[in-house]
Amino acid sequence: MSSRHASTLEVTLTTPSRASDYLDNSSAVLGGDSDGLALVISDATNHEGREVALPLTAVKGALGYVPDLVHGVHDDGSKWTRPVREESGLLVFEVPHFSDNAVTFESSVSVAASPATNGTSLSWGLSDLDAASDVSVNLTGVSNTEWDNQTFLSMGDGDSRSVSVAGSAPPTGPNGSPSITVTASELEAATTAESKSGFFMVAGWDDNQDTYVNSEMKFTNAPDTASSITVDIEYTYANVDSNDGVYFDVYLVKEAPDGVYAEGTRVADNAKWMPEDGAGNLTIPFDSPQNLDAGANYTIEFVTTTTTQSGPNNQQAFALHIDNNKPQTDWSTKTTDGVSHGYPTHVYWGAKAASNVAVSADDGTEVTLGDFSQGESKSTNFPIGRDATQITTTTGSGSVAVELAVQEKTETVDPGVELGNCSESYPGTLAAGETATLTLNSSCLSETNELNVTVGGDLSADAPAPQVGVVAEHTAASNQTVDYAGDAWSERYNVSKTWADSRADARLVIPFASNVVSIRGVEFRTNSSSWTGTSNYELDGTTLTVNLGSVDAGETTHVRVNGSRVRVENGSITVTSPTLAGNSLDTEFRMDSWSESSYIAVGGSASGSSSITSCRSRGRLRPSPSSSRRAASNGSTRRRLRRAGRPAPGRSPSRSSRRTTSAFR
């Protein structure tokens, strides 16, 4: 006897050693103070607690005495004890509840950095530590590159300059290899001084012989040091006394020509040229060597101090001229009638055109480029390596500028992660696109998590930053109490979860009872929105997984699910392939225990009706239009159930509700 739901309660008398054979998720096992008797009390339909009464004489006959206490254990392992009282020839005791299904909300925590560098941190929160899985971290190799072009100006014969090629992998360049561009030095003159007959005077008197002439000229691509300036002179006499000449000071200033003279540093004091000096190079030595900014632009200023004259007043005054239209200077005379008699000159910074040019590095790299004309450029591959520390030039009597084009490369070396007090790393190098997986134990997790990334190896500070792709994932779950309702023909869930943190791939997992044959419907809603049906779920046996997608922190997800089930009399089955919502009933199940008196009762549902089923030794279990509810079997172990016809009268559903422990993941 039972205080409620007597029609669905089943009692099996057995021994304690065999009691576990009868357990399922709708059963409880109880026994007295002796090990001689065990009762398995089952209710596959109604799961709330109730009082149960057994005949006093039957219990006393089995045990030999009347017990004072009943001890129980559920199939989930939980135990309970209740007192026994005698009433009207019955032993009465309470079964507090029957075993519960565990409803589970699952979700995935996934954080990623594409890519991460050394010291990158990824953070996330977690509300229920006990339900979190281990953290899986996928590390993917990344190649990071950066250009580190280096320019070396005014390199002469035998000059060496420091070079640095950083990174953890061989460098590349414009065509897959580092390269150099070598340019021979050249001069540029700026004609800002007074112009006469296509020339302007650099030093001397003007045509009226009453004003000293000053001038300036610009030179580009200066060397790093200079100790003289050279004038290459060719001349002829024309009404010029061999004793007539010019004296001038030379100034050096780092600026563009501006018409202002005697600026900067006076590098030559009272330099002179006399016709008697003849043709050829006139080198004007500086009073001391000058340190310059290599490659910069400088202005040379000529400031006349005096000229020498002999003979009558109509004798010409000497002056240094520069042709406006050609890159040369003239040391010439001017007559008062404007007739010019010149001594053409060429001014340069000591070095001439470069010849037999070669560039080498101390790692063994070397190229030869041959002779250069003034200002000429040549490019070639220069496969310098990470071990190189300097380059050296061979230039003959000239000078060159060298530009090194190199792309440094860093690979993923010794990547690792730290989470709390836990750390894991991958030793060695991950090639670009190669992935390694590390696992951090779930005990490393906390309510607030920070995953720190390490990557690098032994690199110099100027190397490209080492990088690694990081994806860290784990599942998470949180337990809660939900309402569960069932009757003779259905099993229904209406559950909800408020998410403390944002989650990806949220899922609801419901392990239905073994006799649920189809899913009538799955609906969900977010916060207070309307209920919406969904087909985004999967069935694995009778375990239903509803895919909810991404959820935000503070969001509440509601899900309700309705499943149809059958009632098995004098036997047991396990449904292995239920019918999805919206489809005609076509369910496969396994008969775990069966006898001549066993049968399956099928209730009405949206997909069909109850019916008689017949069971053959082979084939499918098919519905019959008869109103009988029995299905016989002669040994078949797996059958398929199909729905047909209209509902036949069946037992009135006995409805109840229970509260079960569930988990959201």
Image (cartoon, grey):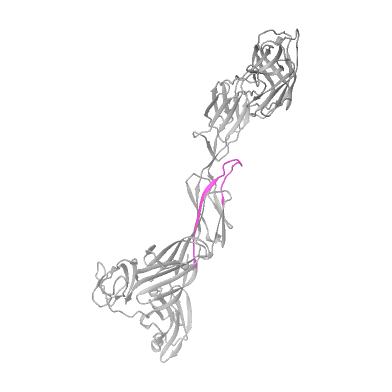
User: How many numbered discs sit on the rendered protein?
Assistant: 0
> Which residue is at a point 73% across and 26% down the rendered structure image?
265
* Relative height, residue 403 to residue 3 (above, below): above
Left or right: residue 164 compared with residue 519: right
Q: Is residue 15 visible?
A: no
Q: Quadrant of residue 196?
A: top right
Q: Is residue 520 visible?
A: yes
Left or right: residue 129 compared with residue 613: right
> In the rendered structure, does residue 47 fall within the stretch colored magenta?
no
* Relative height, residue 121 to residue 429 (above, below): below
Query: Where does the magenta region start and end?
Result: 452-478
Left or right: residue 170 compared with residue 187: left
Q: Name the residue nearer the viewer: 77 or 220.
A: 220
* Relative height, residue 255 to residue 75 (above, below): above
Q: Quadrant of residue 335?
A: top right
* Relative height, residue 288 to residue 624 (above, below): above
Tell me where residue 343 appears, x and y as whole percent.
65, 12
Q: Name the residue nearer the viewer: 476 or 552.
A: 552
> Which residue is at a point 28% across and 79% down the rendered structure image?
649
Tell me where residue 17 appears, x and y as whole percent.
41, 75
Locate the N terminus by quadrant.
Answer: bottom left
> In the rendered structure, does residue 471 fall within the stretch colored magenta?
yes
Tell me where residue 10 appears, x and y as whole percent.
37, 80
Tell me where residue 307 appears, x and y as whole percent.
75, 14
